Image (tube, grey):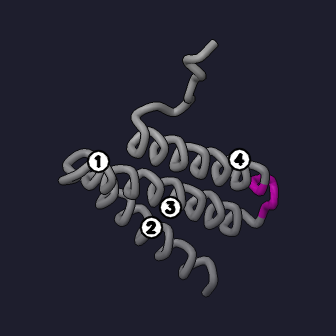
């Protein structure tokens, strides 16, 4: 029973990823695209977790943590770029 529910959930998450990919490509504004990229990262983490549950393995836990960290850093970088126009600020007084 649990295996069937996990497979249905994998299909639903995959379909939502298709919608998010469309939003990344055709998003009306750049902040919409950034939010869609962040949601893609969360869905990717969910897919890895569901596959890990499906094959009954805990070998993917490090992958989930790594994807979470990378998605967070990417979202913060995009947000900073949109706000200030630069990711790394350099001191021009030197």
* Residue 27 forms part of the magenta stretch: no
Q: Residue at x 60, y 51 (%)?
A: 72
C-alpha separation, residue under disc 4 versus residue under disc 3: 14 Å
- The residue to which callout 3 is attached is 43
Q: Which x, y percent locates residue 79?
A: 46, 48
Disc marking residue 47? none
Task: Tell which circle, 3 or 1, labels the residue nearer the N-terminal end.
Answer: 1
Q: Which x, y percent locates residue 36?
A: 37, 56
Tag 4 secondary structure: helix
C-alpha separation, residue under disc 3 versus residue under disc 2: 6 Å
User: Which is in the foreground here, disc 2 or disc 1?
Assistant: 1
Residue 51 higher or lower than 66, as above or below:
below
- The residue to which callout 2 is attached is 13
Task: Tell which circle, 3 or 2, labels the residue nearer the N-terminal end.
Answer: 2
C-alpha separation, residue under disc 4 versus residue under disc 1: 25 Å
User: Which is in the foreground here, disc 4 or disc 1?
Assistant: 1
Task: Tell which circle, 2 or 1, labels the residue nearer the N-terminal end.
Answer: 2
Q: Which x, y percent locates residue 57?
A: 79, 61
Tag 3 secondary structure: helix
Q: Residues within 10 Å of mark 3 (few under 14, many from 20)?
A: some
**Image position of 81 (left or right of 73):** left
Stretch in magenta? 57-61
Task: Tell which circle, 4 or 1, labels the residue nearer the N-terminal end.
Answer: 1
Q: Quadrant of residue 92?
A: top right
Residue nearest the observer in this picture, 51 or 36: 36
* Residue 59 forms part of the magenta stretch: yes
- The residue to which callout 1 is attached is 30
- Tally the marks: 4
């Amino acid at each position: 029973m649990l295996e069937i529910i996990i497979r249905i959930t994998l299909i639903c998450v995959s379909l939502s990823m298709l919608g998010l990919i469309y939003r990344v490509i055709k998003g009306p504004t750049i902040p919409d695209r950034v939010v869609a990229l962040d949601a893609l990262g969360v869905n990717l983490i969910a897919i890895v977790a569901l596959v890990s549950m499906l094959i009954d393995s805990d070998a993917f836990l490090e992958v989930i943590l790594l994807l979470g960290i990378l998605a967070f850093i990417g979202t913060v970088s995009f947000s900073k770029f949109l706000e200030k126009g630069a990711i790394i600020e350099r001191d021009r007084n030197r």
